[in-house]
Image: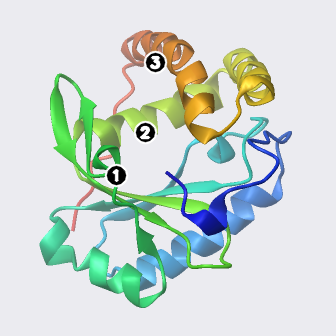
Amino acid sequence: MPFDDEISPTGVTVHPYRSEWAAAAAALAELLAAAVPSALAVEHIGSTAVPGMAAKDCLDLMIVVRDFEASEVEPNLVRLGYRRRPEPWNNTEPAEGEDWPKLVFAPPIGGRSCNLHVRLAGSGPTRVALLFRDHLRAQPRRTEWWSQLKTAAAGEAADLAAYGRIKYPAWCLLMELAESWAREIDWQPPRYRR
């Protein structure tokens, strides 16, 4: 759930792709890599990471760590003003038949709209986030389809929760297509080393 300062009085807005998202994400990734030196990677994920994709003007970045505690990711991000999202679904997420731990942080008050997802290297959700991005980068027709669906969902949704509920069944179908694509080309997520 968004914090009070993140709630838009106009509801959910999906924008046509903006080329500046890539540069903004790269700058934020650099800041996060410096803030969490034990991170194995900082990846730009989600819709703003896909050229041509319509999206909310909110960057999603994923900090990949081996261990939440040893990485000191939480205290380091809190020091920069990032706020941990407390909801249960922001602390665990299902993938590959099991629940995986995760952390999600909101921006500092007044900061650039973003979600910082902290996930474990080799976890199911880390793989799913990268598969979503890489699949859509490689499939422009599916990018166009997903953009149209998100734009329509935003037009019908009263708030962010409703927007998510509208998209979810189609997201499941999209990820089935992504898994098929992954098998066809033998896609594998990166193997992070450090």
State which quadrant residue 129 falls in: top left
Mark 1 Cα shell of 10 Å, populated few (<14), some (14-19), many (≥20): few
> Is 132 placed left or right of 136 in the picture?
left
Residue depicted at 55% across the width and 30% down the height: 164
What amino acid does circle 3 point to? Answer: Met
- Colouring method of the image: rainbow
Alpha carbon distance from label 3 to label 2: 10 Å
User: Residue 2 in the image: x percent, y percent?
Assistant: 55, 56
Mark 2 Cα shell of 10 Å, populated few (<14), some (14-19), many (≥20): some
- Nearer to me, 67 or 86: 86
- Nearer to me, 179 or 73: 73
- Nearer to me, 149 or 40: 149
Q: Earlier in the sequence, mark 3 or mark 2?
A: 2
> Is 10 placed left or right of 128 in the picture?
right
Vertical arrangement, residue 128 with respect to residue 89, above or below: above
Q: Which residue is tagged 2? A: 129
State which quadrant residue 163 falls in: top right
- Determine which of the numbered discs, if any, sits on residue 175 in the image: 3
Q: Earlier in the sequence, mark 1 or mark 3?
A: 1
Mark 3 Cα shell of 10 Å, populated few (<14), some (14-19), many (≥20): some
Alpha carbon distance from label 1 to label 3: 24 Å
Residue depicted at 31% across the width and 70% down the height: 39
* Residue 122 visible: no
Marks 2 and 3: in contact by CB < 8 Å?
no
User: Residue 113 in the image: x percent, y percent?
Assistant: 66, 64
Q: Which residue is tagged 1? A: 87
Q: In terms of secondary structure, where does tag 3 sit?
A: helix
For the C terminus, the image quarter is bottom left
User: Residue 86 in the image: x percent, y percent?
Assistant: 34, 60
